[in-house]
Amino acid sequence: MVFLLIPLSCIVHVAYGWMFGGQHQWPVIELIVICASLIVLMRMFRSAETSRAWLLFLNVAGWLIGMGFLWWTQIYSSYPQPTFKLSIGTQIVGLVAPGNRDEPAQVADPDKVREGSSKKIKLPELQLAAPQDEEIFLDASGKSFQLTPSPAPPNKIQPSADPPIKSALVRNAKFAPFLSTSSATLLVFLRGWW
Amino acid sequence: MAIVYGTPEDAKKAKEVSSCDLEIWADTNGAMIDQFGLRDIGGNPFSGEDTARPATLLVSSEGKLLWAKYSSNYRLRLKPGEILSAAKDTLSKFRTSAQ
């Protein structure tokens, strides 16, 4: 019974992280439960007069699971040195579709922007998860409409010049991804679908 | 805007699994994660293929990187509250310096 607490702690840790994203660098509670279980198992082994082989097996298995858990949380799941290449203020070319913004002069924190202001990177195109046989446009009120059968080429879609409010946003595989026309856009890189 | 390294089918699965409202884009050949330095070589525990390191970036409407956070451990993710708070702080700084 005590032994079961060890794998159970690992399972709870994974399940909690999977379902709620709540994981810490050091899973303290799980480690305390595992350590306590190992201590109890060891004491049981020392004081036992019967079933010593079975208790020895449980001890070894418990240690292996505990060490495996520690290795996974602290070593295997950790990335080596940071490899992130961009500094704050770097201009990311390709995220803004031509003429597709309505706030022309967003000013960044001058100190931070200065650090990377000379850098520029050009991004490749991405594909959307949804089927890509359509082009969707949003009008000024945010309502979407579709152009068929032969939509205008992306570079001919221009927002209204004045006032430059949301218009002609395009969601299409042919396009480089675009930024929101509001202040900023959050890019979230996912590790995978699993 | 969420980006997954893989095929559009992977992006679709990611959207289904996460049930999120975001559009999920597929970086099919990894060119984008390479630009950001987010390639995790052999990071897929099932197939051994490369994956992207989890990262969250805030980019201004002009395409300038304002804020970035990348994970040092794939178990650890930013909570929505942390992202919102960072975005709020960064954008309020922006507005202040713009005025």
Image: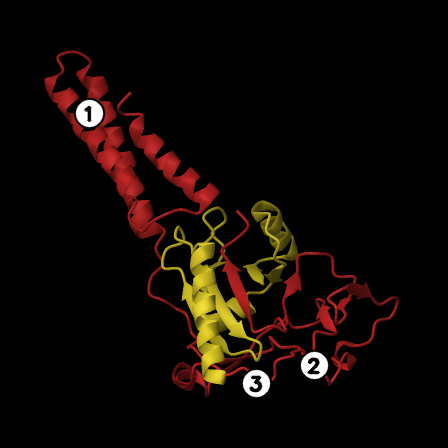
Chain colours: A red, B yellow
Instruction: Depth check: give the residue in front, B43 or A163.
Output: A163
Give x and y (percent) for residue B60.
Answer: 54, 76
Q: Which residue is mark 3?
A: A105
Seen as rendered, the residue at the extreme top is: A50
Number of residues whose C-alpha sits closer than 10 Å to that of mark 2, classed few (under 14), some (14–19) or many (20 or more): some
Q: Quadrant of residue A177?
A: bottom right
Q: Nearer the viewer, mark 2 or mark 1?
A: 2
Give x and y (percent) for residue A34.
Answer: 25, 34
In which quadrant is the N terminus of chain A drawn? top left
Residue A100 sits above or below residue A1 on the image: below
Q: Nearer the viewer, mark 1 or mark 3?
A: 3
Q: What's the amino acid at mark 1?
A: Leu
Q: Which residue is mark 1?
A: A41
Q: Could one spot residue A93 in this view of the protein?
A: yes
Give x and y (percent) for residue A27.
Answer: 30, 44
Q: Which residue is mark 2?
A: A164
**Residue A10 vs residue A62: left or right?**
right
Q: Which residue lies at the image location 48% right of the left edge and 76% below the top edge? A: B65
Give x and y (percent) for residue A29.
Answer: 28, 39
Marks 2 and 3, the one that precedes in the sequence: 3
Residue A182 sits above or below residue B18 on the image: below
- Helix, strand or loop status at disc 1: helix
Q: Which residue lies at the image location 48% right of the left edge and 73% below the top edge? A: B91
